[in-house]
Amino acid sequence: MASVSGLTGFDAGGLVEQLMQLEQAPQKRLQTRVGNEQLRVNSLQTLNTRVASLFTKAESAGDLAKWGGWTATSTSDKVSVTAGPTASATSLSITVNRTATTHQLGFADTAAPGDVVVAGTTAAREVVLTTGGVAKTVAVGGGTLQELADALNDPDNATGVRASLVSTTGGHRLLVESASTGAASAFTLTNADGTDLLGGATVRAGQDAELALGAGITVTSATNTFTELLPGVNLTVAPGTAGGTTSTVTVARDEAAATKLVKDLVDGLNSVLGEMKSLTAYGANGAGKGMLAGDSVVRSAQQALRGTIFGDDGVSLATLGIQIDRTGTFTLDEAAFKKAYATDPTGVAEQFTSGFATRVKEAADGASNKDTGTLTTALTGRKNGIERLNDSIEAWDRRLELRRTALSRQFTALETALSRMSSQSNWLAGQLSSLSSYRA
């Protein structure tokens, strides 16, 4: 029995999909390239940010004003000292002759808080407070001991004294002291008619603080703080410090602050250089290959930063504790730096600010400047390249859609033709089968 077979089961859709996978291969390569390029852009962007941060550190280390800090110390915990920008290095021995005290009046008579103690009529009981030859009349209301203390303490009266009622055997006694210290704080307090108040007072005279600086030099202050004792130097004596207390006051450059400026700069340099080394590494047999391996822009910036170790003045930074080892890493010998700084703080500061820090700042700016930096320019170029690749990918989308439409039409036509052929085959097979039966 004759038959025609093999013309059924045609999968046009599957064939189109398989052919489209082949057609999409170039586009997929572009997409892979975009992904890899974006990773490079991310790495370059991170590096550029770190170089910009290095620029800021170099700018800080290059600010001469930040190298002018001073530290001030005292060998006595009773004497504190501070130093400002206008100070200069010095060592000074001082002796505290006396501290500043307030002026006090302790009145003799005792009384109850409600007892009338101020002379005068009921309508006008007043006291007179005299300070520096200037008399001030203070109204005391009913004239009781409590009202007297309240009137002296009333801020509206601006008496410049403080009054307290001290409880003693037999009643209370009035203690009045000046709000400020020093000899100029002396005052008197009497009834309005000039008679003694509360039986008169025992006086503890206010006094100025006094320091002996040696060689017959003494200085005084109305307070326990001696402002500008030396240019830029303020000294404070603790209240109640015993006479004869001695101290050595030393003012010196702030080595710790200067060392930190330099260390921050060196650490920042090494951080950036380490990142560059990792990004541009080729690796053995491809292993450990950096994202920016072979990037000439990064290598150029790396060389510029390493080259900052060399200056045009012929002075080696090694004498200041800074060197670069065979791996390209900067090292800082803090002990050597502090020794050099202690010997010539001004010279060392100028060498760093106008030399090393300036070179690092210029190299960092040359790489990371937002307008002209080489890394910034490279970033812009790579981003533009990604945009062009994405445009090509979009163009491929349109091209592939057209190709899919064309293939679908072709295979639909082929499937239709095959279906027609299949029908004809089935009819022919039927006819042949009929002929065979007739012959039989």
Image: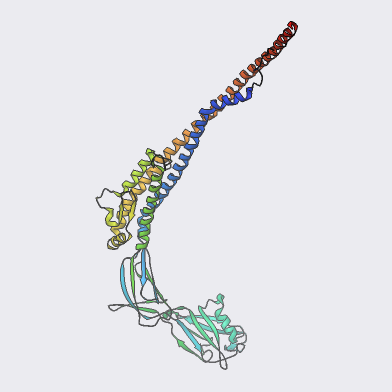
Query: In the rendering, at what x and y percent does residue 390 appear?
Result: 52, 32
Which residue is farthest left?
314
Q: Nearer the viewer, residue 95 or 216?
A: 95
Looking at the rendering, in which quadrant would you find the C terminus?
Answer: top right
Residue lying at 64% horizontally and 23% vertically, measured from the top left: 11
User: Outermost residue, bottom direction?
Assistant: 170
The tally of labels here is 0
Quarter where residue 224 is shown: bottom left
User: How far from the left and from the top, in percent, is residue 70?
Assistant: 36, 64
Residue 279, picture quadrant:
top left
Q: Residue at x 56, y 93 (%)?
A: 169
In front of the other: 127 or 426: 426
Residue 119 percent across, percent down from the top left: 57, 89
- Vertical position of residue 20 compared to residue 68: above or below: above
Looking at the rendering, in which quadrant would you find the N terminus?
top right
Q: Position of residue 176 (x, y in %)?
A: 51, 84
- Considering every residue shown, the one lying at the far top of the view is 439
In the displayed structure, does residue 397 sit left or right of residue 37? right
- For residue 372, say whether it is visible: no
In the rendered view, does 409 fall on the left or right side of 279? right
